[in-house]
Amino acid sequence: MASFNHFIGDLKARLAEPEMEKKELYPELICLFDYYQKLESRLEKISRISDGIQAELRDLKDKYERQSVTDHLTGLFNRRYATQRLKEEIARFERYGEGVSVCIADIDKFKTINDTYGHNCGDLALRGITRLLINNLRSSDVVARWGGEEFLFLMPHTNLGPAIHTAEKIKKIVAEASFSHEGEEFRITMSFGLAQYQKKDTLDSVLTRADHALYMAKGKGRNQVAHL
């Protein structure tokens, strides 16, 4: 770079000489033009590399953000994300009074599935249930893996009556579905506990009511829908 700056300084000095014939400088000007062409080409290459690196960094950022809120086995949202969304829906309720219902659903006798067919079959069952839930809930509903064999549905703009109807529909669809593992078919049922957020509720209290309702459904013989 120092030699190039010296070259430019010398060229400017020679151009300033009144008796200088400009045509004598053509070789230097051609050299200068050639240099700038090469420099421009290098800058374009650097710009393309920089754009590529920035795109890769954005993709990595998006990937890690998705992973931070996603359950790796089912691809559903995880408990952390569902809790945050519930907080947002509670804030919306407190501002606008719009109904919001919560359902905690649990695969009945999931341990028996694992013990009978193996943990791979248990994973298959979780993914199969995931597909059924996604296909039968609204796009506005939040479906999350709550933990183990438990799922949570967050249903915005939904009062308890329609939420119960949705849970009953899904219960029936799951019970009628057939699952298979290594050529052997098996059936799954689920129990559902629901609660609608009320003015007196907190995030913890509405989740506790849904959880207690789930235990009521289990206590009634499983494959049931209960609410509190």
Image: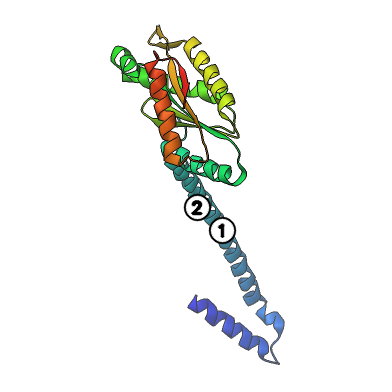
Residue 53 tag number: 2
Residue 22 in view in this figure = yes
Q: Position of residue 155 (x, y in %)?
A: 55, 32
- Name which residue lies at 56% across and 58% down: 47
Q: Mark 1 and 2 residues: CB-CB less than 8 Å, in contact?
A: no
The one of 96 and 150 positioned closer to us in this rendering: 96
Label 1 crowd bin: few (<14), some (14–19), many (20+), radius 10 Å? few
Q: Is residue 27 left or right of residue 141?
A: right
Residue type at the position of mark 2 = Ile
Q: Position of residue 48 (x, y in %)?
A: 56, 54
Q: Which residue is mark 1?
A: 47
Q: Secondary structure at mark 1?
A: helix
- Name which residue lies at 46% across and 42% down: 202
Looking at the image, residue 1 lies above or below residue 156: below
The one of 55 and 133 positioned closer to us in this rendering: 133
- Name which residue lies at 52% across and 42% down: 90
Label 2 crowd bin: few (<14), some (14–19), many (20+), radius 10 Å? few
